Amino acid sequence: YIADQGNNTIRRASTPVGPSVGNPTPATQAVNVGGTATITATVTGFPAPTLTWERNPGGTGVFAAIPNAAPYSGVNTNTLTITGATLAMNNDTFRLSATNSVAGPVVSSIPAILTVNQPPTFSSGSVTFNATVGQFSSFSVAAAGSGTITYSAPAGAFGLGFSLASNGTISGTPTSTSEAVTNVTVTATNTVGTGTQLVSITVAPASSNPVITTHPTDFVVPVGQTFANPAFSVNASTS
């Protein structure tokens, strides 16, 4: 005997029965990048149905049969295994389709949703910012990753001139060039893991207003006379 779940009937195995596919388990699943996901669905029917797992990239396109190759295995069984999930699979949906010799359309399960979580990742290993003595400066570091990301650095790493907020903002008003910092390790953290970036800040001296060091020389021209092309010159400097 065989269970015909679609019609809530127990039938003799010799009686052809169209396929029936149960809901996939789990319906939603979250794994970290590089992790393994497994999705299972119950299938009945006689003769034994031919099974095919299908993928819808991002859940916004169309379903297509999954090739029987890495990172997938079990694509023609009722259990699909994904080994080494990539970020490109985030929000993909998967369903199991079944068919046999009984006339009728292909039967498919409802989709199962896969979420792939990413640890914080910086676009570069190091970054340098520029500041000036006596002027307020604000910079930001940012990592890509899943969920909320917080940022931290060793206590006192940014010295007296600057501070790091948990949202990745580095700010401060340096009072001297000695408050420059070199290769401070900033750590980004989320529920998946951590990532780091080296931060350096150069501090330039403040520029002063120009000071005239040489004033122009006076010229005296008698009334009624023309003085051609008088030469006036001024020299100035900044500290």
Image: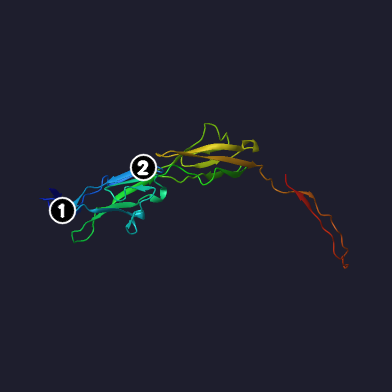
Residue displayed at 41% across by 51% down: 88
Number of marks present in the image shown: 2
Residue 76, percent from left and from top: 29, 51
Disc 2 residue type (three-letter): Thr
Res 133 seen here: no
From what the image shows, is residue 31 above or below residue 106? above
Tag 2's secondary structure? strand
Three-letter amino acid code at the position of disc 1: Gly
- Picture residue at 63% right of the left edge, 41% below the top: 203
Q: Secondary structure at mark 1?
A: loop
Return the residue at label 1. Answer: 6
Asked which quadrant contains residue 36, the reply is: top left
Residue 40 appears in the rendering:
yes
Q: Which residue is mark 2?
A: 36
Residue at horizontal 60 percent and vertical 41 percent from the top: 201
Q: Quadrant of residue 173?
A: top right
